[in-house]
Image: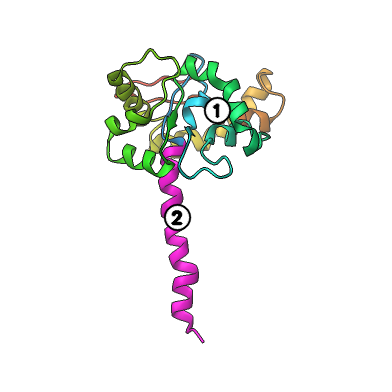
Amino acid sequence: VISPLPFSLFVSLEPLCCMSFFLALINVSFHGFIEFDSTGRHIPCINSDTIIDGRDDCYGEDDHMAHHYYTAVSHRDLKAHQETQKAEWIKHHASVFKKLSHIEVSIFMLFNLWDKLAEHYVDYSGKLSRGEVIAMLKARAQRKEMTYEEYEFDFLPTIRQRAEALVTKGACVSVEQALKEIAHTNHPVHQGGGGKKVL
């Protein structure tokens, strides 16, 4: 018979702490790069990454773009799906890496090992130098959509009003659609100073 304290520690607390750390770590890789198009919308192939020929990909978990934006694509069909995405990947210099894991991407980002990360970056355009890849990855990883204060005190309190305004203007047919539009649109962007407001 196991006493309640060790049981609680090893069955509840330890897995909770380890999984929280692990999930936070891999989410740095999943969504660590931010880029917007000219209209202020998130660019999906940059804001979610893909790893090609990953070391631990069993069910398509290395294609985080498909996980978010092409949810109906089965892990069995990912290779064919990725072929359909290459034009977009070339156009935007997508966040695609080869032969590493999401944990490694996260660690390289957290420890500013941009040179190591650039070794695994897949430049489908074939036009970027190693220095340009490093500069691009670093800029995308350091970009902030908004500060915590802006999120907490400006963005959240007015989100419903902005959604309702989009419906009133006819830009969206429902508040739910407007909330999704707001979620995928650039708000104050901080790149070492000035930002721009789109909505």
Q: Which residues are magenta?
A: 1-30
Q: Can residue 178 be seen in the rendering of this structure?
A: yes
What residue is shown with label 2? 20
Mark linked to residue 184: 1
Residue 141 x, y percent position in the rendering: 36, 31
Query: Is 89 situated above or below 103?
Result: above
The image quarter containing residue 58 is top right
Which residue is depicted at the point 47% across and 26% down? 46
Can see residue 181?
no
User: 36 or 199: which is nearer to us?
Assistant: 36
How far from the left and from the top, in percent, is residue 55?
Answer: 45, 42
Task: Indicate whether residue 19 is drawn in magenta.
Answer: yes
Question: Counting residues from the N terminus, which is met first, the one under dot 2 or under dot 1?
Answer: 2
Q: Residue at x 43, y 32 (%)?
A: 98
Gap between marks 2 and 1 measured at Cα:
26 Å
Q: Is residue 146 left or right of residue 89?
A: left
SS at badge 1: loop
